[in-house]
């Protein structure tokens, strides 16, 4: 019996040493140490042996079993480590490599690109970029911009009103039922910015604006503007002119000039409409062929924005924030981003910006 145990032990040791995979070890375990294995049967039958044999056989059997189990475990660890290494080597993916085929990089919508170009020009001149709420109070959109209640200029902007009951809970209830709207321009941020910061102030405010307009080649109920505001103690209309010259040259080319025509906005006095010299004909109104330039319609000038000196009445609404109408002065301007992008890139239809046709987007990378 003792010899048989010795034989079995060497047989199993040889099998363990020869095993190549963890699956082999499981087979060995079942075959030699399982419930029906010979060694198990021997150990189970010890009680039936001669009393003299029981001790030595039990001892040798248990020792063999313990030693084999330990060897199995050791070999299993070895094999597992090797198998893991192989799996890792086989599965290796370098997630930092480009895909195959390489996915084309996306690009910004031309409106966003134009917005950033405009921001760049003004940050280069020392302005900060601010943003403001699109759901706005009548107070900021109109009243504090010198449109008194009932003023006809309010009617000129086809305003979307917002049911105040639809505002999220926790928002302070507005003063009246008609007092919440989608901002019709970015100008309300002039007032919010002055409330937030004493003079001097130099900001540009890009963002979405809304008017109940049709959706056609030149209108969209959602559009984009950039507002500008510069207020200090001695900022003049000449500074506005110089600033807009720098802007027009940066966006439309170094040869550009600007021209002011009288205009009207309730929140500026005086107000101006600003034209840029036409970049298609160079300002002559005629193409090289002698034909009338269709872009500026022969005028040599293209209207690009509205501007003016901030009306003292507007400072009246922020006087308690350091804007004494007797002491501060400055200018404001507002432009449509769609218009700048259309003009600069010769896009014939404003709807192209919103349709997300990749063929259109790809032209402006
Ligand atoms: N808010 C005006 C509009 O939407 C544009 C404008 C004109 C803004 C004159 C200004 C300004 O700041 O001074 O038509």
Image: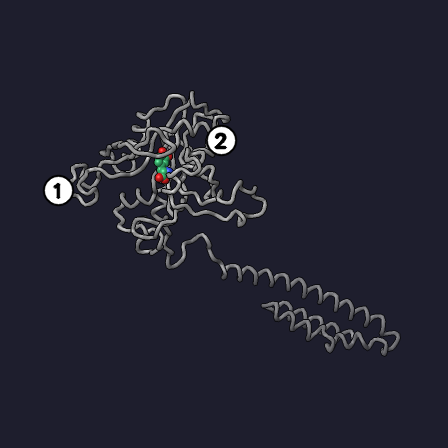
Q: Where does residue 85 sit, x and y in percent of width and height?
A: 55, 59
Q: Which residue occupies the foreground of this view, 275 or 13? A: 275
Of pointers 1 and 2, the one earlier in the residue sequence:
2
From the viewer's perspective, is 140 left or right of 172? Answer: left
Mark 1, residue position: 288
Mark 2, residue position: 195
Q: Quadrant of residue 76?
A: bottom right
Q: Which residue occupies the foreground of this view, 365 or 193? A: 193
**Tags 1 and 2 in contact by the CB under 8 Å rule?**
no
Looking at the rendered image, the quarter that the N terminus falls into is bottom right
How many marks the image carries: the answer is: 2
The reply to whether the residue tagged 1 has its Cβ within 8 angstroms of ligand 1 is no
Task: Tell us which disc is closer to us: 1 or 2.
Answer: 2
**Which residue does the image show at 61% across and 61% down from the upper left?**
78
Q: Find residue 222 and name its label.
A: none
**Which residue does the image show at 77% across and 77% down from the upper left?**
41
Does residue 361 lie above or below 253 as drawn? below
> Does residue 120 appear in the picture of this structure?
no
Circle 1: element type: loop
Q: Where does residue 315 sit, x and y in percent of width and height?
A: 44, 27
Q: Which residue occupies the foreground of this view, 251 or 139? A: 139
From the viewer's perspective, is 347 left or right of 332? Answer: left
- Considering every residue shown, the one lying at the far front of the view is 150
Q: Which quadrant of the render holds ligand 1? A: top left
- Considering every residue shown, the one lying at the far right of the view is 51
**Which residue does the image show at 38% across and 36% down from the upper left?**
227
Q: Which residue occupies the foreground of this view, 52 or 75? A: 75
């Amino acid at each position: 019996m003792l010899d048989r145990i010795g034989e079995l032990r060497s047989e199993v040791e040889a099998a363990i040493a020869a095993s190549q995979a963890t699956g082999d070890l499981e087979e060995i375990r079942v075959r030699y140490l399982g419930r029906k294995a010979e060694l198990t049967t021997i150990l189970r039958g010890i009680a039936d042996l001669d009393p003299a044999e029981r001790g030595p056989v039990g001892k040798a059997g248990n020792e063999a079993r313990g030693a084999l189990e330990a060897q199995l475990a050791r070999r299993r660890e070895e094999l597992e480590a090797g198998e893991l290494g192989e799996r890792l080597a086989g599965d290796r993916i370098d997630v930092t490599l480009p895909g195959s085929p390489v996915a084309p990089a996306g690009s910004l919508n031309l409106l966003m690109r134009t917005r950033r170009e405009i921001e760049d020009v003004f940050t280069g001149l020392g302005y900060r970029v601010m943003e403001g709420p699109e759901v706005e109070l009548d107070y900021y959109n109109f009243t504090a911009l010198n449109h008194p209640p009932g003023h006809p200029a309010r009617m000129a902007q086809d305003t979307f009103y917002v049911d105040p009951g639809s505002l999220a809970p926790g928002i302070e209830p507005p003063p009246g039922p008609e007092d919440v709207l989608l901002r019709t321009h970015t100008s309300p941020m002039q007032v919010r910015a002055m409330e937030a910061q004493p003079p001097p102030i130099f900001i540009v405010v890009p963002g979405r604006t809304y008017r109940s307009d049709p959706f056609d080649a030149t209108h969209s109920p959602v559009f984009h503007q950039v507002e500008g505001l510069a207020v200090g103690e001695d900022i003049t209309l000449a500074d506005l002119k110089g600033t807009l010259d720098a802007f027009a040259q940066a966006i439309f080319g170094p040869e550009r000039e600007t021209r002011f025509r009288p205009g009207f906005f309730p929140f500026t006095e005086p107000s101006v409409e600003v034209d840029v010299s036409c970049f298609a004909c160079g300002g002559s109104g005629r193409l090289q062929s002698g034909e009338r330039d269709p872009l500026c319609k022969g005028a040599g000038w293209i209207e690009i924005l509205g501007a003016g000196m901030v009306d003292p009445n507007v400072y009246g609404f922020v006087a308690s924030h350091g804007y004494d109408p007797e002491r501060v002065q400055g200018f404001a301007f507002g432009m449509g981003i769609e218009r700048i992008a259309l003009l600069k890139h010769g896009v014939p239809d404003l709807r192209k910006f919103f349709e997300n046709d990749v063929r259109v987007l790809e032209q402006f990378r």
